[in-house]
Amino acid sequence: MKHLIDIKDLSVEEIDKMIEVAKDIIANKEKYSHKCDGKLLATLFFEPSTRTRLSFEAAMLRLGGEVLGFSEASSSSVSKGETVADTIRTVGCYADIIAMRHPKEGAPLVASEKSTVPIINAGDGGHNHPTQTLTDLLTIKCEKGRLNDLTIGLCGDLKFGRTVHSLISAMSRYKNIKFVLISPKELVIPEYIKKEVLDKNNIEYIETNDIEEHMSELDILYMTRVQKERFFNEEDYIRLKDYYILNKEKLEKAKKDLCVMHPLPRVNEISTDVDDDPRACYFKQAQYGMFIRMSLIMKMLGVE
Ligand code: NCD
C-alpha cells in the first residue's frame, strides 16, 4: 500500500505516466466511467476547501465510485476530542481510500502511519499540497507542451503557501528549470526549501520583491493568495494582503505565450480584467485538477 504525503513519494516516471493517463481521460471520458465501480473515497477535510474536495469527489464519482466524508472538523468526532489517528483507523473500516486536509503540518503523515487504506495529503498547514502540484504539472504539460526548459515566476506568499513548496519540489526534478521567487521580504520562501531543494539540486533562482522586473522572461507566472489563516497577527496580514495585484498593464511586457496560473481561491492578487486574457489559465487549471485526481485515484487503488 502506498500513500501520497509528499510529491516526492512519486517518482518522475510515475508522475509522467499519471499525466499521460489524465490526458487519455480528457480525450476518452467514457472509457473510464466504471473504473472504480464499488469503490469508496472518504474526504476528511479539517480545513475549508472548494476545489480540492469537490474535484476529488467529482473525480471518484466520474470513475463510477462513491464518496463520503466531512467538510469541517466541527461536524466530526474530532470536536469531542478524538485523535486524527483514531479517526483514520475508523474511516479505514468504511472506505477504500482517504483524502485528508488538516491545518497541522505533518497530520497526514501521522495518519498514514496508522491507516489500513491509502492516504492522500490534500494539504497540511503551510507545508505541502502534492495533489495541487499534480494539477499544476498537468496544466503546464497541456498548456506549454513540456515540463523541461521553463522559467517559472512564483509570486505572493511563498512562506506559508503550501502549493508553492510542493511545486518547487516537483519542478526541481525536471531539466533546465529556473525560478523567479517574487515576494515581500516577510513572505520569502523558507530556508529549508532553499537548502534542501533548490541548492541541493543546483537549481537557478532569483529572489525579488518586484513582480515586473523579470516579467518578460517568464514562461509561467504562478500567483498565490496571502495565507491569512497562517498569520499570527492581523495587522501584518492587512499590510501584506494586497502587495501584488496582477492586472493587464503589468502583463504588457510578458511573453505572448505566458501561462498565468493560480491554485485559487483568489482574493485580490489577480484583477478580474486578466480573466479574459488568453494567458489566464487558472480556471482551466481547476478543471485539470479533477482529471489528474481521477488518474491518481486509479493508480492508488491499483486500477488498470
Ligand atoms: C490552495 C490551498 O488550499 O493551499 N487552494 C487549493 O487547494 N486549490 C491555495 C490557497 O488556499 O491559497
Image (tube, rainbow, N blue to C red):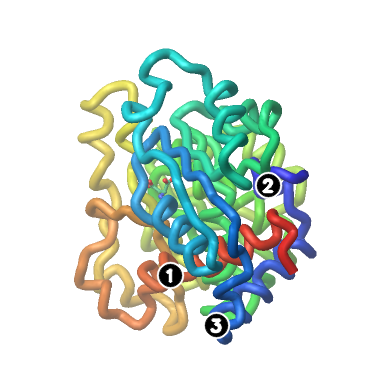
Q: Is mark 3 within 8 Å of ligand 1?
A: no
Where is 130 relative to 292, above or below? above
Asked if residue 251 is positioned above or below residue 60 in the image, the reply reads below
Report whether 121 appears left or right of 14: left
Q: Residue at x 67, y 32 (%)?
A: 115
User: For the C terminus, which image quadrant?
Assistant: bottom right
Q: Which residue is mark 1?
A: 287
Asked whether the beta carbons under mark 2 and mark 1 sit within 8 Å of each other, the answer is no
Drawn side of residue 267 relative to residue 278, left or right: left
Nearest to N terminus: mark 2 or mark 3: 3
User: Any atom of ligand 1 within 8 Å of the CB at mark 1?
Assistant: no
Q: Secondary structure at mark 3?
A: helix
- Category of crowding for the residue at label 2, using alpha-carbon neighbours closer than 10 angstroms: few (below 14), some (14–19), many (at least 20): some
The answer to which of marks 2 and 1 sits earlier in the sequence is 2
Q: Which mark is residue 18?
A: none
Residue 215 visible at all: no
> Mark 3 — residue?
30
Residue 49 image offset from top left, x and y in percent = 36, 46
Q: Nearer the viewer, residue 87 or 138?
A: 87
Judge the density around disc 1: few (<14), some (14-19), many (≥20) Cα neighbours within 10 Å: some
Q: Where on the picture, by quarter, is residue 252? A: bottom left
Q: Relative to the observer, which residue lies in front, 72 or 33?
A: 33
Among the 4 quarters of the image, the one containing residue 1:
top right
Identify which amino acid the numbered label 3 is placed on. Answer: Glu
What residue lies at 63% left-to-right and 81% top-to-bottom? 24
> What secondary structure is found at the residue carrying circle 1?
helix
